[in-house]
Image (spheres, helix red, strand yellow):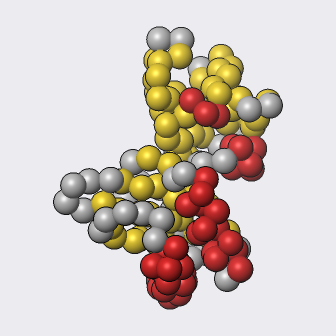
């Protein structure tokens, strides 16, 4: 999976926001057999299948006209889900206090994978608390980041 070029996001995002949805982000998985463009959308009321269908119809129309991706690919529209991907600085700030898993392109401090509590942003660095140690992870060094769902225990056993 790879993040989209800014040009492609610039084509997709205005279509989605004009429809009243939040453009969370997108990934492109290029493959010789079946490439996939996956776009994540959200809104205050959550995302239903009809929302994904409406956005898919509008975005595919624009992509057909603009033709920014050479070759065949499958377009998927999805809600961000509980393990929501984090794409932008504002996502890391917005979900400060939540647990996240972050994978870097290259090792930092001898590791590429970090799981801890998001502490927001400082400039272009994501602050992450892992076992009481705070790591500064440059936003442009992050390959993939997602929230780790945390479920509260009811104390009942089934």
Q: Residue at x 47, y 22 (%)?
A: 106
Q: What is the x, y in percent for residue 44?
A: 70, 74
Q: Residue at x 50, y 49 (%)?
A: 3
29 or 149: nearer the eye? 29
Relative vertical location of residue 72 with respect to residue 121 in this rendering, above or below:
below
Q: Is residue 132 left or right of residue 100?
A: right
Q: Residue at x 59, y 20 (%)?
A: 131
Q: What is the x, y in percent for residue 89?
A: 71, 44
Relative vertical location of residue 110 with respect to residue 54 in this rendering, above or below:
above
Q: What is the x, y in percent for residue 34?
A: 24, 62
158 or 58: nearer the eye? 58
Q: Is residue 106 left or right of residue 116?
A: left
Q: Is residue 151 visible?
A: no
Residue at the farthest top position:
110
Residue at the farthest right position:
123
Q: What is the x, y in percent for residue 118?
A: 67, 36
Relative vertical location of residue 93 with respect to residue 59 in this rendering, above or below:
above
The image quadrant where one finds the C terminus is bottom left
């Amino acid at each position: 999976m790879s993040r989209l070029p800014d040009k492609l996001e610039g084509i997709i995002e205005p279509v989605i926001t004009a429809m009243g949805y939040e453009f969370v982000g997108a990934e492109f998985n290029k493959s010789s057999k079946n490439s996939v463009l996956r776009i994540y959308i959200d809104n205050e009321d959550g995302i239903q299948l009809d929302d994904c269908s409406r956005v898919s119809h509008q975005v595919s129309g624009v992509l057909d006209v603009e033709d920014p991706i050479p070759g065949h690919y499958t377009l998927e529209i999805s809600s961000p889900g509980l393990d929501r991907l984090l794409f932008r600085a504002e996502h890391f700030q917005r979900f400060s206090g939540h647990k996240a898993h972050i994978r870097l392109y290259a090792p930092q401090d001898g590791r590429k994978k970090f799981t801890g509590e998001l502490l927001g942003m400082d400039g272009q660095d994501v602050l992450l608390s892992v076992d009481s140690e705070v790591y500064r992870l440059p936003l442009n060094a992050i390959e993939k980041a997602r929230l780790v769902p945390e479920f509260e225990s009811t104390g009942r056993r089934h």
